[in-house]
Amino acid sequence: MAVSQLIVDQLKKLGYLFYAAPPEDIFVEKLEDKKAFSVEVIPAFVILIVLEQLCNWWENKFSARFSANDAVTSAAQGMIMEIGGILTGGIGILCYVWVHENYRVAELPWDSWSTWLVTFLAVDFGYYVVHRAAHEVNIFWAAHQVHHSSEYYNLSTALRQSVLQEQLTFFFYLPLALFIPPQVYAIHKELNLLFQFWIHTQVIERIGPLEYILNTPSHHRVHHGLNRYCLDKNYAGVLIIWDRMFGTFIAEGEEVVYGVTKPVKTFDPFQTQFDYLKYIIKRFRRQKTWASRFGVLFKGPGWSPGKPRLGNVEDLEDVHAPTTVWNPEVASWIAFYGAFHFLVLAADYVAIANAKVVNGSFYDLALQALYVFFSLTVIGALFEGRERAKSLEVVRVVFYLAATQILPVFSFESRFGRSRGAFELSMLTIHALSLLFIVIQILKGRPLKKSNTLSVKQANYPGANGRINTCIPRETVDEEDPTEKATKTE
Ligand SMILES: [Zn+2]
Ligand SMILES: [Zn+2]
């Protein structure tokens, strides 16, 4: 391929992140012809994240705005969301197709710009509704809180997504199936989410008059904020006009503090995805009446018996910068090792994503997905400085070396369509050297942890302050379980 063609191709893919795609990509006749935009933009994700860190470094704010363990955890959740969607066969779009085929009242033409505009507005308004529900209904928040669980705010935060959210909320979009063709809907749904990548940054302050119409980095910083003025504001996807229309807009004011008030404090993917759900189940089982059990599931996260649907703002302590973030420090060699192996793992993820595109078998994909999930768990444990992570890493690397040679489902031939080449040789060498390296570390008894303290990004951490909808006021926990109080208020 000529260099100029390569540049045009990459620019086209970069455009997907800004809702810009050429007609041949957005006017497709069948759902099967739709491009896998989220896979195509992976190189752009990496390049933009690196560029953002160069800007942060230039502004002397690199360590305040970015941490590799947090970024890897965020990107890992994005992988898990995509793999979850692949394994569930895209239940949301399957239901959409079923409704469209059986109950449509009109069929908008798939190749018309007016359909494009109607779908753009309909999907974006749908996103506003779903997103607001995800903050105001506790069971939906159980999924969406994953996205808010980082205490940093940078481009990698955008990748931190819930594996459950689509499965729990897809039905909100089903009314669109009455008149919008599935492939048009699917394209806009994906572009809408991809647009939200670039707004997760502190590098861009304001973008002039576009702030009136578009969701921007400034507006979305507010959405991720814990400061009282930020609570339950700016739910927009692409257009901020919905927030302006429905009274949920507020402009960015004092410096934003990021995160949730019930922080998971872990890099473990299972806990990041499901700990809040476990917490809801625990609260549900403690309730004495069905009315309060219903409330735990369907009222706001800040609700408890006797309070308004969304809780009381007075229960919540206001939060102001500066604060500190949870960041266990590990030896620098392990931080590098973990980040490097996450990048190596991206090849295994892309193999799953591409196999889906060419209809890989469910069990083959599920086995590969289990390996990726296990690997992410081990990398998370390394970042937390857990000593058992070293032996788990030995198991993981030995499995990789054996499975790629013995098990057909893991072979390079079946996953990448080529074997015995430079790619296989480099991957095997990387894993063999890693095995040697980690065994040496075990024999030498080098500890993973540098210290067990909080890393000070800023000072004066106020503790578990709450937001009405998206966070749990401490009282919600404390009133119900005195033993939990002791641990939560440490
Ligand atoms: Zn949100
Ligand atoms: Zn966000």
Image (cartoon, rainbow, N blue to C red):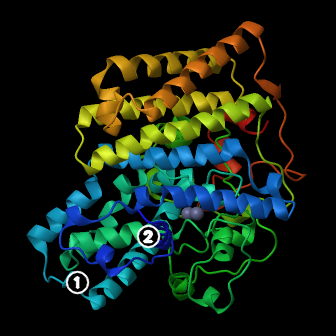
> In the rendered image of this protein, does residue 240 appear above or below residue 462?
below
Give the residue type that dot 1 points to: Asp
Q: Which of the marked residues, 1 or 2, is nearer the chain's N terminus?
A: 2
> In the rendered image of this protein, does residue 68 appear above or below residue 16?
above
Residue 96 vs residue 14, the one in the foreground: 14
Quarter holding ligand 1: bottom right
Question: The residue tagged with tag 2: helix, strand or loop?
Answer: helix
Tell me which residue sits at (26%, 75%) in the image: 176
Question: The residue tagged with tag 1: helix, strand or loop?
Answer: loop
Residue 270 vs residue 202, the one in the foreground: 202
Picture quarter with the C terminus: top right
Indicate the position of residue 376 as horizontal and vertical percent values.
Answer: 54, 34
Farthest left residue in view: 102
Farthest front residue in view: 2
Indicate the position of residue 317 as horizontal and vertical percent values.
Answer: 78, 59
Q: Is mark 2 within 8 Å of ligand 2?
A: no
Give the residue type that dot 2 points to: Gln
Residue tagged 1: 111
Indicate the position of residue 312 as horizontal and vertical percent values.
Answer: 65, 64
From the viewer's perspective, tell me whether residue 417 is left or right of residue 320: left
Q: Are marks 1 and 2 in contact (CB under 8 Å)?
A: no
Farthest right residue in view: 459
Indicate the position of residue 66 as horizontal and vertical percent values.
Answer: 74, 52
- How packed mark 1 is, by other alpha carbons closer than 10 Å (few <14, some 14-19, many 20 or more), is some
In the rendered structure, find residue 5 and report the number of the disc placed on it: 2
> In the rendered image of this protein, does residue 467 appear above or below residue 235?
above
